Amino acid sequence: MLKGIFLIFLFQLVGEVIQKLLELAVPGPVIGLLLLLLALLLTRSSKRSFKIELETNLTVASEQLLAHLPLLFVPIGVGVVMHLSFLESSLLKVLAVIFIGTVLTVGFTALVIEKIQNWRTVDD
């Protein structure tokens, strides 16, 4: 699991460095995530042991991180409760943005999953 977390943090660090050097508007972790995706896509057809180990380590680390993901929402919830007075004046706007963002995210995720499943059936 430590190797997988190290790889995730390594790609995040590389993304941060690229973002700082090139002064991009895109956050460093997003750049790192795209680089990790690119690395996985480039090694997709490889049958070498390092690729299998890479995927295994990333899968284990990802599953462990996702298991504890709800803990990351606790500080956000506390922050919202502490600043509730600021939200009262624009509550309907905030709720509309949350609703629209959720619907768009679910729809986009469904499309991506459908494309990936179609992509996998074509490759198999």
Image (cartoon, rainbow, N blue to C red):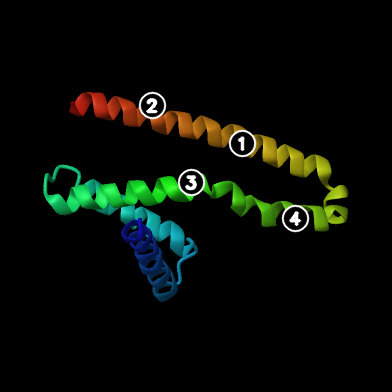
Q: What residue type is labelled 2?
A: Glu
Left-right relation of 117 to 106? left
| Crowd band around label 3 with a 10 angstrom C-alpha radius: few (<14), some (14–19), many (20+) | few
Q: What residue type is labelled 3?
A: Leu
Quarter of the figure with the N terminus:
bottom left
Can you identify the residue that label 3 sits on? Answer: 66
| Element marked by disc 4 | helix
Residue 119 position within the rendered picture, expressed as x and y whole percent measured from the top left: 27, 29
Between marks 2 and 4 in the image, the one whose residue lies nearer the viewer: 4
Q: Which amino acid does label 4 sit on?
A: Val
State which tag comes first along the sequence, 1 or 4.
4
Residue 91 position within the rendered picture, expressed as x and y whole percent measured from the top left: 82, 44
Left-right relation of 113 to 106? left
Q: Which residue is drawn at 53% across and 49% down?
A: 68
Q: Is residue 89 shown to the viewer in this render? A: no
State which tag comes first along the sequence, 2 or 4.
4
Residue 81 position within the rendered picture, expressed as x and y whole percent measured from the top left: 80, 53
Can you identify the residue that label 2 sits on? Answer: 114
Gap between marks 1 and 4, in whole Å?
21 Å
Nearest the camera: 114 or 77?
77
Q: Which residue is drawn at 75% across and 57% down?
A: 79
Left-right relation of 105 to 73? left
State which tag comes first along the sequence, 2 or 1.
1
Can you identify the residue that label 4 sits on? Answer: 78
Gap between marks 2 and 1, in whole Å?
18 Å
Whether label 2 touches label 1, CB < 8 Å: no
Gap between marks 1 and 3, in whole Å?
19 Å
Residue 1: numbered disc: none
Quarter of the figure with the C terminus:
top left
| Element marked by disc 1 | helix
Can you identify the residue that label 1 sits on? Answer: 102
